[in-house]
Image (cartoon, helix red, strand yellow):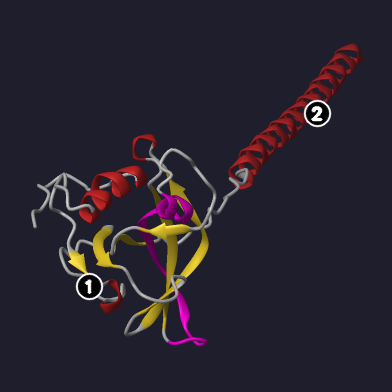
Amino acid sequence: MSKLPPGFRFQPTDEEIVFQYLAPKIFSCPLPASIIPEISISKYDPCREFPGDSDGKDKYFFSNKEPGNRSSRATEDGYWKGTGSDKRIIYRKWKPIMGTKKTFVFHKGKHPRASRTDWIMHEYRITIYGNIASNSQQGKNCQGSLIQIGNWVLCHVFKKKPSTKTEVYVDRPRFCEFMKSELEDTSSSSCASSSSSNLCSDHSSFSSEVSSNAANEETSRRNV
């Protein structure tokens, strides 16, 4: 199995996973690249390391079809539980064959005391309508039950990022600095007013004293 060179990431779309990798695998056709390993998904727990590079990135695996109930996948330390409805992946050139995508969430422990984890698995299958497969009506898109083709599924395993609540911080007005500057201005104004008032008062007293002295001098001259 080959590895991608540094700087490259394997991020295929749902259509590419189904029709470029899974379908060729089932029909024994050449794959675009041999980068998806084959494992038995039930033998590995996502809380431990999967085979391959332990880089913490998304993992893709070919796995054999699991028998029994498709809504649950048991492992050694827990189980994958199906959630939501299946998504149909259709590509016009491949009709009436289509892909289906089912989502699983890993629960650690045994039911009913298992705890839900952040590990997610998307399981891809190749399917066809049951009545088309039985009657070979290739040109008629009849509604019916879906039947899986082949014994391979493609699993995309990844860990969901924990949701972080965005906290909104309100930038409070800087009353301290604002009020401080305003108080300083007010204080300065008060001081200036007080100083001015004092100066005016002193000036009045001085003027009265000068006038009184002048009147006394004038009275003394007359007496002489």
Instruction: Tell me which residue sits at (11%, 47%) in the image.
Output: 6
Q: Nearer the viewer, residue 23 or 149?
A: 149
Percent x, y for residue 182? 66, 37
Distance Cα–Cα, label 2 vs label 1: 96 Å
Question: Dividing the picture into quarters, in which one does residue 26 lie?
Answer: bottom left
Which residue is identified by label 2?
205
Q: Is residue 192 left or right of residue 36?
A: right
Q: Nearer the viewer, residue 219 or 65?
A: 65
Q: Is residue 125 above or below residue 51?
A: above
Q: Is residue 89 above or below residue 223?
A: below
Q: Is residue 29 left or right of residue 206?
A: left
- Residue farthest to the front? 135
114 magenta-colored = yes
Percent x, y for residue 122? 38, 59
Which residue is identified by label 1?
49
Q: Amino acid at mark 2?
A: Ser
The stretch in magenta equals 110-135
Q: Amino acid at mark 1?
A: Glu
Q: Residues within 10 Å of mark 2 (few under 14, many from 20)?
A: few
Q: Nearer the viewer, residue 157 or 37?
A: 37
Q: Is residue 8 left or right of residue 171?
A: left
Quadrant of image for the C terminus: top right
Instruction: Tell me which residue sits at (43%, 38%) in the image.
Output: 139
Q: Nearer the viewer, residue 136 or 182?
A: 136
Instruction: Tell me which residue sits at (8%, 58%) in the image.
Output: 1
Mark 2 or mark 1: whose residue is earlier in sequence: 1
Question: Dividing the picture into quarters, in which one does residue 61 lie?
Answer: bottom left
In the rendering, which numbered label is found on residue 192?
Answer: none
Percent x, y for residue 33? 14, 47
Label 1 sits on a secondary structure element that is loop
Question: Dividing the picture into quarters, in which one does residue 15 lie?
Answer: top left
Q: Residues within 10 Å of mark 1 (few under 14, many from 20)?
A: few
